[in-house]
Image (cartoon, rainbow, N blue to C red):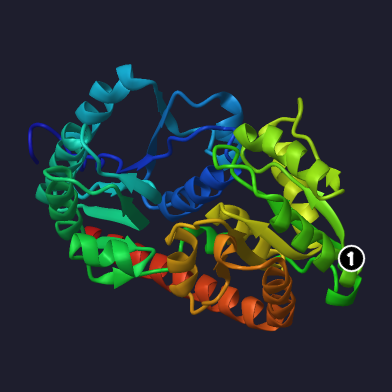
Amino acid sequence: MHSGGSTARRRPRPTRTFVSLTGPAGNLGDALIRRGTLDWALGTSDELVAYVGGAPDVWLQQLGVPTDAIVLREKSSIARWLWMLATAPRRPVLVFEAGEVPLDRGNGLRELVFLAETLLVRLKRGIVVRPPRAVRAATQPSLWLHSTAAKASQFALWRDGTSRATTGGSRLAPDIGFAAGQRPGLLWDERDELIVSLRGKRPVPDKEWAEALKAFAAAHELRVRTVVQVREDEERARELATMLDGVFDEWGDRDAVAQEALVRERYDHARLVISDRLHVLILAALSGAVPVEVVADPTRKIADSFATIGLTGLSADAASLSPDEITAFLTKQLTRADEVRAAVAAAEARLDETEADIRSAIEAARA
């Protein structure tokens, strides 16, 4: 017999997943894609570490962050995040945020830190996941650092072809918001609303645009409603309701969870939703409404993102169209409901396959 008695095996240290989930609680679109990011991280390790920045408690509720997660807040906790990453057991998982990444001047240090985190996880033989993202205002050295970190990640996805080309990436994927699941909504013949939700920081649309929308709504017996998906757009929604002789749904004192439920219910009743915000249109499409961007001088963001799922021709520059042409454009979009539903279903299936690939890669790394 051994004098020390039987030896017990050491229990393996718990595996650990790190996920970044920052964002303002007043932006339902940000909550949508952060929730999708969290879904990809859940269940991949024994421990979940979530960095949420300065987000309030309602943000955790919106996203469904588990109560047993280690939640790190404010910039003061970044040092702890980095320490936990450095001391994590081998084969950790690091999941970055989905969404748009600014790479203008002043972001170089941030991108350098993200590159260091990526290389650290790879040295530990872990898995790095960058859900579908887009880049804007790309400058050096931020772009080089971001592109290098993406290439060092096992999963680096781009939600539009322009961002993929800018970074030298290879994998195109639908915006993660499309993974939220389709809603049945009302039957098409029962839908009786045209919903409008525009950015508050853009110029107010002109009278010709408003007259075109009113003529379209009247011709198709649709009630005009303005909704607020980003709190800072509330005053613009009020103005638009007045311009369009429509109904205004204020956000008011409602918390973000209740506001999201209300807005999504509104989309369930809409035939068309007009917006210059990408995730307004994604949520609208998930509810079976046809998403449309018809504003003056639109960016390529919405057109490029929907092109990734095979939907083109949803955007038009109102500044170059007469009121009759705007009305004709909107009327044409009404014929696309089945096309939109099919494209959204295919996008969700692609994202499900990607998530399955990620989980398989994590299991293989730890086998």
Toward the viewer: 290 or 351?
Answer: 290
Toward the viewer: 166 or 38?
Answer: 166
Q: Badge 1, how many Cα within 10 Å: few under 14, some, many 20+?
A: few
Relative side of 185 to 204, left or right: right
Q: Is residue 307 above or below residue 99?
A: below
The residue depicted at 56 percent of the width and 52 percent of the height is 277
Q: Position of residue 124 (x, y in %)?
A: 13, 47
Q: Position of residue 301 (x, y in %)?
A: 44, 59
Relative side of 11 to 221, left or right: left
The residue depicted at 36 percent of the width and 42 percent of the height is 19
Toward the viewer: 92 or 133?
Answer: 133
Toward the viewer: 72 or 45?
Answer: 72
Q: Is residue 182 visible?
A: no
Query: What amino acid is labelled 1 in the image?
Result: Ala
The residue carrying mark 1 is: 218
Q: Position of residue 353 (x, y in %)?
A: 43, 73
The residue depicted at 69 percent of the width and 34 percent of the height is 234
What is the quadrant of the N terminus in the image?
top left
The residue depicted at 56 percent of the width and 47 percent of the height is 29
Q: Secondary structure at mark 1?
A: helix
What is the quadrant of the C terminus in the image?
bottom left
Relative side of 32 to 106, left or right: right
Can you tell which quarter of the image residue 262 is in?
Answer: top right
Can you tell which quarter of the image residue 156 is in?
Answer: bottom left
Which residue of the protein is positioned furthest toward the top in this rendering? 76
Q: How many marks?
A: 1
Q: Position of residue 297 (x, y in %)?
A: 50, 57
